[in-house]
Image (cartoon, helix red, strand yellow):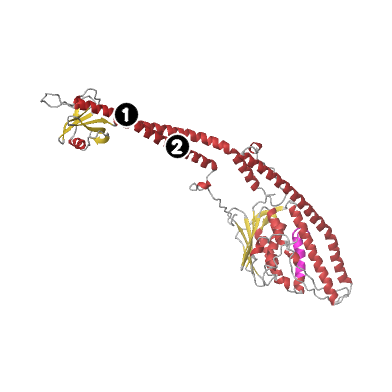
């Protein structure tokens, strides 16, 4: 609900909260997450399988190279010279490493370089070779020439022969496999993500149509008036054979049922409104006749003091009934949506005039004005807007104690709309009554004190009340538009004289309410495209009327 400043806060989507994301976004992300997990599992399995295969292949090659080295390094029988270098055995490939260990020392240690020449090992490499156990189990070690797969075996002639093959080829193959899996998986994920997004978007299209229909229906004014509920889910999204189609079909069935119910309600309301309008129109003539004959009898006949009181009571009640009938007729016309007599209305001047009238009627209240420096002008029906303000002030007068301060304010809000407030420091409205304060025939007598309703008015006040009621009806531009629905609760009697010139006794009158004043306020404000709100607590009750600069019908 907008504040008096006209600012409306709309909550936004929080990307940190997945529950606020679109369903298609979550489905795509979940599918992508599952694909990433599958690709990762396949990649790990492929890497592990390839590593195991290459290791076994390298171990087989290493065993063969070790056997060749051991056989080639066997001492020649009857020869007193040195033993052959194992690295010179036939069939040794580029990068093959051989060393002979005897008596804790390394001899004949080297490897075949890329140019097929023999390269010696560093002292650090020799120290690494001396730590190997001669059990024929392949192990990985890092030497100055790179990573090697080494195997140490004890030859039958007592020497320990160390043979090694480089791991570079195996590592290059595994690295190529990793890069291949990453590139293929990434490309596949991109393609599947795009295709999945398109498929999911197409699949979710019926749900978007359902959401669009539901949103349109939620924005329709279904609370009152004639409603054309012609929005339906398309037939393509309302096929009961699918899950989404079943929802669309059920939504269409529900909308059909609601539409039928609204048409029945509208028909019933129209009958009631027509009856109220006809009854109110027909009652105006007999009520006018009663008032006329009452005045004639008071002018031509002689009555006792009690008779004068009774006749004054008849007259006051006929006036009250007339005002009530005119209020009902006005509400019926407002419900029919009759066009407004639109003109420029100065709300500041309207507030000054209306408050001045109330000061005359209730000088025992403190009436104050809070007006801007510049006039606040809107387009609207001057008579009806006058009635809105008069009803609100009359409501404050009738439901507060003498001495209560009533402040009438006019301002222009940030969004350009005009705001009129009527605030009093009375006892307030009971919380359980605030929600239905604008209902027709709602009476606040049980929740807000109405001292005027329980006290007897003086003859002058009664006469003023009768005059103000007729003046209000004249100000509305029509005899059917009284100043206030609450004013209809006033009963006024004036001291008069009979036909012989004898003074008549003043009537004992009291001010009541018909329960239609605030409902008339709401109907007029809504006809101008505005809103009216009430906030109340003990010591402060405020009615706030917001009017657009230009009414919808203008």
**Are dots 2 and 1 in contact, CB under 8 Å?**
no
User: Residue 82 vs residue 234: left or right?
Assistant: left
**Residue 527, image x and y in percent?**
70, 53
Let me know if residue 334 appears in the view. Answer: yes
Q: Which residue is mark 1?
A: 57
Question: Horizontal and vertical percent for residue 540?
Answer: 61, 66
- Labels 2 and 1: the sequence-earlier one: 2
Q: Camera-side residue: 183 or 358? A: 183
Q: Which residue is mark 2?
A: 38
Q: Main secondary structure of the magenta part?
A: helix
- Does dot 1 land on a helix, a strand or a loop? helix
Q: Which residues are magenta?
A: 463-481
Q: Can you tell which mark lies on residue 501? A: none
Q: Secondary structure at mark 2?
A: helix
Q: Position of residue 415 (x, y in %)?
A: 59, 53
In the picture shown, does residue 400 fall above or below 124? below
Q: Quadrant of the N terminus?
A: bottom right
Residue 199 drawn at (x, y percent):
54, 35
- Distance from disc 2 to disc 1, alpha carbons, whole Å, reads 28 Å
Asked whether 283 or 146 is in front, the reply is: 146
In percent of the image, x 29 and y 32: which residue is there?
167
The quarter of the picture where residue 203 lies is top right
Whether residue 231 is visible, yes or no, is no
**479 magenta-colored:** yes
**Residue situated in front as seen by the camera: 86 or 36:** 86
Q: Nearer the viewer, mark 2 or mark 1?
A: 1
- Residue 28 located left or right of residue 375: left
């Amino acid at each position: 609900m907008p504040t008096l400043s006209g600012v409306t806060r709309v909550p936004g989507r929080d990307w940190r909260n997945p529950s606020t994301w679109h369903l298609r976004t979550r489905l795509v992300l979940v599918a992508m997450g599952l694909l990433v997990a599958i690709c990762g599992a396949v990649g790990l399995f492929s890497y592990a399988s390839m590593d195991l295969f290459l290791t076994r292949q390298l171990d087989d090659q290493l065993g063969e190279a070790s056997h060749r080295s051991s056989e080639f390094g066997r001492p020649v029988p009857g020869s007193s010279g040195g033993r052959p270098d194992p690295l010179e055995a036939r069939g040794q490939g580029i990068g093959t490493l051989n060393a002979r260990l005897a008596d804790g020392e390394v001899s004949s240690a080297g490897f075949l370089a890329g140019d097929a020449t023999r390269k010696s090992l560093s002292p650090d490499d020799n120290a690494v070779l001396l730590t190997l156990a001669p059990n024929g189990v392949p192990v990985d070690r890092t030497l100055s020439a790179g990573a090697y797969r080494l195997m140490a075996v004890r030859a039958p002639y007592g020497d320990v022969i160390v043979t090694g093959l480089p791991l570079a080829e195996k590592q290059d193959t595994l690295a190529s496999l990793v890069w291949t899996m990453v590139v293929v998986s990434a490309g596949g994920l991109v393609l599947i993500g795009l295709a999945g997004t398109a498929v999911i978007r197409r699949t979710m299209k019926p749900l978007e149509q359902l959401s669009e229909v539901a949103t349109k229906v939620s924005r329709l004014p279904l609370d009152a008036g004639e409603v054309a509920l012609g929005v339906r889910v398309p037939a393509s999204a309302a096929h009961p054979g699918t899950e989404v189609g079943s929802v669309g079909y059920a939504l269409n069935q529900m909308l059909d049922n609601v539409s039928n119910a609204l048409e029945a309600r509208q028909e019933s309301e129209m009958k009631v409104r027509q009856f109220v309008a006809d009854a109110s129109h027909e009652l105006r003539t007999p009520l006018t006749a009663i008032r006329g004959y009452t005045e004639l009898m008071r002018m031509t006949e002689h009555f006792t003091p009690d008779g004068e009181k009774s006749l004054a009571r008849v007259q006051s009640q006929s006036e009250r009934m007339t005002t009530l009938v005119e209020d009902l007729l006005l509400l019926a016309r407002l419900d029919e949506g009759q066009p407004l007599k639109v003109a420029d209305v100065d709300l500041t001047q309207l507030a000054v005039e209306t408050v001045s009238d109330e000061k005359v009627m209730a000088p025992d209240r403190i009436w104050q004005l809070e007006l801007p420096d510049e006039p606040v002008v809107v387009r609207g029906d001057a008579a009806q807007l006058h009635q809105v303000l008069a009803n609100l002030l009359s409501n404050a007068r009738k439901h507060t104690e003498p001495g209560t301060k009533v402040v009438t304010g006019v301002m222009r809000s940030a969004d350009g709309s005009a705001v009129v407030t009527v605030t009093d420091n009375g006892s307030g409205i009971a919380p359980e009554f605030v929600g239905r304060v604008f209902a027709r025939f709602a009476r606040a007598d049980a929740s807000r004190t109405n001292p005027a309703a329980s006290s007897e008015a003086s003859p002058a006040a009664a006469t003023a009340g009768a005059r103000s009621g007729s003046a209000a009806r004249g100000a509305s531009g029509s005899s059917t538009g009284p100043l206030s629905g609450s004013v209809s609760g006033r009963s006024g009697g004036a001291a008069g004289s009979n036909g012989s010139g004898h003074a008549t006794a003043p009537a004992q009158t009291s001010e009541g309410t018909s329960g239609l004043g605030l409902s008339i306020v709401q109907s007029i404000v809504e006809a101008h495209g505005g809103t009216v709100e009430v906030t109340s607590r003990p010591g402060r009750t405020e009615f706030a009327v917001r009017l657009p600069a230009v009414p919808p019908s203008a």
